[in-house]
Amino acid sequence: MTKFNEVVRVGIADMNIVERPTKIRTSGLGSCVGVVLYDDMKRFAGLLHVMLPDSSLGKSDCVNVAKFADTGVVALIELLKAEGVRTQSLKAKIAGGSQMFQFGSGDTIRIGPRNVEAVKKELKRLSIPLVAEDTGGSIGRTIEFDPATSILNVRKVNQGSKEI
């Protein structure tokens, strides 16, 4: 029996994969970046909720790979490959990376933009095309991806939603 309207939720510094008709969602994207990798032919998708740009920022030897752009994108690809998705078939959509704080100095207040830059750098390094994005600003977001349609719905706090 096929389940309709099922949505898998991804937490902060977390990742998961789904196959149609199941959708995948994350909320709480302020300076964090939601990275969707998908294969529109196989109708598989993965979602990664990146908190920080680089695993060297980790404070312990036990690294949560989903927390960082440089380790999380690769780990998400490995999950998709385990389901038979070919790396060459993947496309990406991203959202988030807001500048949430206006105080402080230097890179400490630029976590959102740095997260976006780090995700784009990894996608480029891995030759995964970025086909759509909704990044920057100072507003939090919730995103939901439907692998059946390859549509990413982006809801911004007090600003409604749009599809990319």
Image (tube, helix red, strand yellow):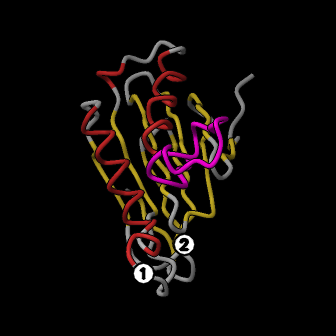
Residue 16 among magenta residues: no
Quadrant where the image shows the C terminus: bottom left
Q: Secondary structure at mark 2?
A: loop
Please state which amino acid type lies under the numbered disc 1. Answer: Ser
User: Which residue position is annotated with label 2?
Assistant: 140
Name the side, left or right, on which 149 lies relative to 118: right
Q: Is residue 72 above or below residue 156?
A: above
Residue 150 sits above or below residue 113 on the image:
above
Q: Are marks 2 and 1 in contact (CB under 8 Å)?
A: no
Q: Residues within 10 Å of mark 1 (few under 14, many from 20)?
A: few
61 or 127, nearer to the observer: 61
Alpha carbons under labels 2 and 1: distance apart: 21 Å
Residue found farthest to the bottom:
103
Q: Which x, y percent locates residue 141?
A: 54, 67
The segment highlighted magenta reads 49-68
Q: Residue at x 41, y 59 (%)?
A: 163
Residue drawn 43% across the image and 40% down it: 70
